[in-house]
């Protein structure tokens, strides 16, 4: 099985080409794409990777994509691309949250919380029960967005957190100022999303292409500022 992984959720993205050989996944190649150029480079980069290794688009057996949260534009481009490929060639598609991929990268069982800077003094967070030996290792308890104080309160409640992780060093420093200890991990790449997609696909988990959308967790600025203002005189 030929697997394509795509990540355009951050300032730098990537496209990965992997091949399943028995129970092993072999990475054929990963290409990096600069943020701000996703619309121009995503499809050509994928086509170049496939051509360099002697494949056609119809050869793809599985698509794995980062579904967000992250760049609104980047996520829209990636989701539209994989949906188009999936529909055109009847290719299975697995979408994975950036927060889930980060939590899985912690390599820790138990209650794991992943955090990403959402700007505006807010944090995207995901809370998961991780059991590495399970076929589907990450059970999502919740994902959301919170202020720094609310996030600190969230961490302090419930079962003990086995690991709190992020891919953002600046966020780790800011959370450290609140007394929280957080581990900085490399940001998941297209290769990670391809590997997660393969594991989920083997147990029958895949996306409904017709209803799939990006996991924004927050409305875009365009939506927020387009909301009509209420005239006090008309109340």
Image (cartoon, rainbow, N blue to C red):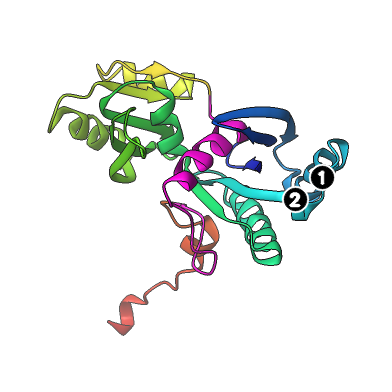
**SS for dot 2:** helix
For mark 1, give the secondary structure.
loop
Furthest residue to the front?
22
Q: Residues within 10 Å of mark 1 (few under 14, many from 20)?
A: some
Quadrant of residue 77 in the image?
Answer: bottom right
Q: From the image, tell me which residue sits under label 2.
A: 59
Q: Is residue 48 above or below residue 30?
A: below
Q: Are marks 2 and 1 in contact (CB under 8 Å)?
A: yes
Asked if 232 appears above or below 139 in the picture, the reply is below
Residue 87 position in % (x across, y down):
65, 66
Residue at 53 percent across and 69 percent down: it is 210
Q: Which residues are magenta?
A: 187-216
- Residue 38 % position (x, y): 73, 46
Q: Identify which residue is drawn at 78% across, 53% down.
A: 57
Residue 217 placement (x, y as % from top left): 41, 51
- Whole-percent x, y for residue 188 in the image: 54, 30
* Left or right position of 226 against 140: right
Q: Residues within 10 Å of mark 2 (few under 14, many from 20)?
A: some
Which residue is labeled 1 in the image? 55
Q: Residue at x 34, y 18 (%)?
A: 182
- Judge from the rendering whether residue 53 lies leftward or rightward of residue 194; answer left or right: right
């Amino acid at each position: 099985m030929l697997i394509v992984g795509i990540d355009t959720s951050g300032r730098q993205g990537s496209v990965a080409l992997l091949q399943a050989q028995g129970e092993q996944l072999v990475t054929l190649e990963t290409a990096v794409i600069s943020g701000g150029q996703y619309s121009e480079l995503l499809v050509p980069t994928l086509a170049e990777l496939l051509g360099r290794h002697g494949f056609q688009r119809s050869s793809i057996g599985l698509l794995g994509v980062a579904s967000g949260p992250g760049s609104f534009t980047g996520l829209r481009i990636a989701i539209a691309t994989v949906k188009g490929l999936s529909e055109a060639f009847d290719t299975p598609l697995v979408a994975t949250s950036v927060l889930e991929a980060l939590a899985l990268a912690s390599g820790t069982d138990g209650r794991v919380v992943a955090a990403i800077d959402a700007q505006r003094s807010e944090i995207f967070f995901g809370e998961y029960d991780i059991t590495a030996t399970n076929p589907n290792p990450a059970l999502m308890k919740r994902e959301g967005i919170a202020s720094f104080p609310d996030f600190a309160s969230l961490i302090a409640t419930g079962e003990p957190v086995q690991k709190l992780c992020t891919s953002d060093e600046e966020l780790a420093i800011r959370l450290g100022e609140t007394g929280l200890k957080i581990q900085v991990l490399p940001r998941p790449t297209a290769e990670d999303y391809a590997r997660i997609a393969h594991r989920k696909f083997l147990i029958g988990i895949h996306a409904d292409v017709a209803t799939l959308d990006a996991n924004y967790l927050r409305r875009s600025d365009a939506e927020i500022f387009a909301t009509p203002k209420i005239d006090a005189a008309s109340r």
